């Protein structure tokens, strides 16, 4: 699909019957409680803030984790389910979950993953840097650090501006220069984080 025929990229609210106000939580079918807590609480550092029965199936436990900004990630778990080795891909399936991390903790995060025996890849995605690993069930987990300091309430605006600059530039994807240009155009401070050099990833 060409950019000319695609839906417009904009921060303007669409003409819809209603509008969401944010992400409340995401729920994943988990394996067992011990493995889930070991990965999300003990490795990724997410506090376990609520544990209760799955209200639709009380034979399962519903675990609630705080991802760091008050947004919640929850799992349905059962102690009779071992952790799996991989995810089944397909339409409607979850490709990956992405969580924000502090840029100055990047090296520490890679060291912690290595110590935990978790493989990972590091990519420069143009608009941010990403570390990819897998949870206890093979679900791809992305740990993302912004290249530039961006106010949370302006992120959509910055990305939409970078998109326009990318299109004007004829680039296949948003590069570092488009993010920098977007910040300058919007009158925001250009503060770049010190992140390691990395490839863009397969397929680019």
Image (cartoon, helix red, strand yellow):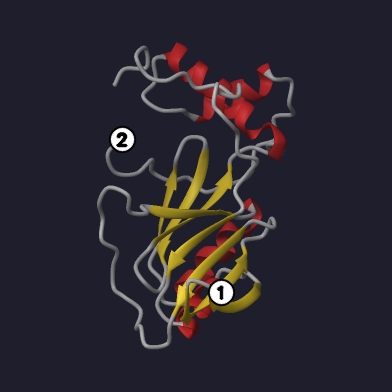
x%, y% of residue 113?
A: 48, 70
x%, y% of residue 149?
A: 68, 39
Mark 1: give few (<14), some (14-19) or many (20+) Cα within 10 Å. Answer: many
For discs 2 and 1, the disc positioned in front in the rendered view: 1
Where, by quadrant of the figure, is residue 5 drawn? top left
Q: Nearer the viewer, residue 175 or 186?
A: 186
Secondary structure of the residue carrying numbered label 1:
strand
* Residue in view at x 52 percent, y 30 percent: 176
Q: Quadrant of the C terminus?
A: top left
- Establish if 171 lies above or below 153: above
Q: Is residue 23 left or right of residue 134?
A: right
* Residue in view at x 45 percent, y 81 percent: 35
Q: Nearer the viewer, residue 193 or 57?
A: 57
Mark 2: give few (<14), some (14-19) or many (20+) Cα within 10 Å. Answer: few
- Establish if 136 lies above or below 66: below
* Residue in view at x 65 percent, y 54 percent: 104
- Establish if 125 lies above or below 26: above
Q: Which mark is residue 160?
A: none
x%, y% of residue 76?
A: 47, 73
Q: Which mark is residue 204?
A: 2
Q: Is residue 163 left or right of residue 188?
A: left
Q: CA distance from mark 2 to mark 1?
A: 38 Å
Contact between labelled residues 1 and 2, with CB atoms less than 8 Å apart: no
Secondary structure of the residue carrying numbered label 2:
loop
Q: Is residue 5 left or right of residue 101?
A: left
Outermost residue on the bottom side: it is 80
Of labels 2 and 1, earlier in sequence is 1
Q: Which mark is residue 63?
A: 1
């Amino acid at each position: 699909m060409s950019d000319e025929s695609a839906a417009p990229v904009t921060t303007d609210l669409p003409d819809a019957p209603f509008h969401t106000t944010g992400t409340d939580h995401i729920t994943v079918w988990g394996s067992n409680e011990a493995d889930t807590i070991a990965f999300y609480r003990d490795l990724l550092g997410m506090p376990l803030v609520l544990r209760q029965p799955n209200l639709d199936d009380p034979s399962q436990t519903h675990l609630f984790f705080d991802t760091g900004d008050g947004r919640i990630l929850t799992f349905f778990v059962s102690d009779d389910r071992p952790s799996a080795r991989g995810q089944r891909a397909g339409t409607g399936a979850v490709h990956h979950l992405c969580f924000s991390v502090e840029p100055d903790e990047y090296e520490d995060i890679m060291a912690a993953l290595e110590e935990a025996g978790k493989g990972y890849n590091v990519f420069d995605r143009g608009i941010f840097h990403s570390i990819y690993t897998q949870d206890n069930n093979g679900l791809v987990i992305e740990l993302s650090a912004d290249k530039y300091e961006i106010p949370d309430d302006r992120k959509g605006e910055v990305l939409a501006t970078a998109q326009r600059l990318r299109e004007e530039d004829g680039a296949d994807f948003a590069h570092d220069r488009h993010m920098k240009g977007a910040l300058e155009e919007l009158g925001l401070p250009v503060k770049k984080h010190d992140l390691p050099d990395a490839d863009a990833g397969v397929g680019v």
